[in-house]
Amino acid sequence: MKIIPVASGKGGVGKTTLALNLALALSRRYKTVLIDLDAGTSSLRNFLEMKINQDIYHFLKKDVPIEKCLVPLDRSLDPEQQFAGFRMIASPKNFISEIVNLDGPLKMKLARGINQLQADYVIMDIKAGLDSHVLEFLPINNTGILIFTPQMKAAISTAVELVRAILLRVCRICLSQKASRMTFRDILREKDFQVLNSLIDRLEDSYNRRIKNFDDFFLEVEKRFPYSVIISQLKQFITRFRVYFVLNQFNGVEESAENIIKPFMEKLNQMVSSDIMITNLGWVIFDEEIRRSSEDGLPYLVMQQYRREPEMSAEDRLDAKLRELVGLDTQKHEPIQKISEPAMTNNEVTYQLDILHRMYARGASKDPEANFDFIVARLQALKSSSIHRFGMQRIFSSMEIRRAFYS
Ligand SMILES: Nc1ncnc2c1ncn2[C@@H]1O[C@H](COP(=O)(O)OP(=O)(O)O)[C@@H](O)[C@H]1O
Ligand SMILES: [Mg+2]
């Protein structure tokens, strides 16, 4: 199972649109569960015109097993079962304070429930914000999707804050007082953890000019504890963090590079670390029908699926006729091409631009459906790549993170 959160820190950038359509695109071939973790405003329910009887509330508060809260697409929306692999867990339709502000035990219950799901992919629609409800459901290493849109530049800073917050959380967990009792084979002593935590405080305090980012932090820490194995492991972990992102309302390679990729990279270097890498997973163009689909309660991909026939151009109709004549499948399937990763270069921006150009050249720019299929193909390729291993296997609790780190 691969768990993939879709997050941005900001609202209105297209998280729900991407999470929903990506889950649908995946569900044509894989068992996919979409989890609505935006309990505050549950836009997902507005995106889907169908009745939902069991949701997260029933799982968390009424002890209904999580499998019973998995809802397929309504038959009226998907009469031919084209998205048979699709299930979702919705948030409550109306505001329920306890569900919006999950306490510790409920958060743990939710994480355990998600970990138990039987699916190939779990896509999580994460709400905006940077609080613990967001952070605890995000991966501690390189496995989630951040989404941007050039129409909202403020999303870049929030995304950088999100990355910083994820990494600060890992540092805190791994250097907590509890961890100090696990490190008997390291040179660090219990009192050293107090020093380390005060350095984390200084790193977190963005007004502190001496420790601006993790590079500064590790410089200070290594000065004090040059021979600690734990510290060098933590440093390796932080500097190998990789950010995956999708560009929404994409408007061309050059514009995205200028408006998003370059400023994002610069801010990451400045606020997080100069070692952080970013990887583009694809884009979604602006499309009036995508916008309308959220109002009509019919997901974009479902709408496309059931109106393909009458939409055919004269040329496509002729093509279909010819295909029928010679006994071929009447629908043309564009082969999803595998994109080989170019050799790593030190210049991340050039590397990202190169990938974008190659994707563009392979026709991922034409229609939103191709865009979603393309992202699916990228996820599949990166899932088995030894560098990336995209997608987390389970949601780890703080204790599990600590244990994994020290074992
Ligand atoms: N690629 C796109 N083309 C056109 N409209 C889009 C696109 N992506 C998102 N939208 C529209 O933008 C609005 C916000 O998208 P939404 O997915 O709800 O964002 P979020 O979940 O981040 O708040 C919605 O009305 C949606 O239909
Ligand atoms: Mg949303």
Image (cartoon, rainbow, N blue to C red):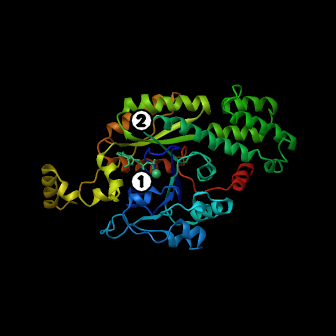
> How many numbered marks have been drawn onto this rendered protein structure?
2
* In the displayed structure image, the side of residue 359 where residue 221 appears, left or right: right
Give the amino acid type for the residue marked by disc 1 in the picture: Leu
Front in this rendered view, residue 378 or 45: 45
Question: In the figure, residue 26 lies in which quadrant?
Answer: bottom left
Of the numbered discs 1 and 2, the one sitting upstream in the chain is 1
Q: Check disc 1 and report the residue beneath it.
A: 22
Q: Secondary structure at mark 2?
A: loop
What residue lies at 30% left-to-right and 68% top-to-bottom? 80
Quick one: label 1, few (<14), some, or many (20+) residues within 10 Å? many
Above or below: residue 51 compared with residue 7: below
Give the amino acid type for the residue marked by disc 2 in the picture: Pro
What whole-number distance in Å separates the C-alpha atoms at marks 1 and 2? 20 Å
Above or below: residue 384 compared with residue 152: below
Residue 193's x, y, as percent? Answer: 82, 41
Front in this rendered view, residue 204 or 265: 204
> Which residue is the extreme one toward the top?
209
Q: Secondary structure at mark 1?
A: helix
Above or below: residue 406 compared with residue 277: below
Residue 337 seen in the figure: no
Residue 256's x, y, as percent? Answer: 40, 33
Front in this rendered view, residue 50 or 389: 50
Q: Check disc 2 and report the residue beneath it.
A: 150
Question: In the figure, residue 284 lies in which quadrant?
Answer: top left
Quick one: label 2, few (<14), some, or many (20+) residues within 10 Å? many
* In the displayed structure image, the side of residue 266 where residue 331 appears, left or right: left
Q: Indicate which disc residue 260 carries.
A: none
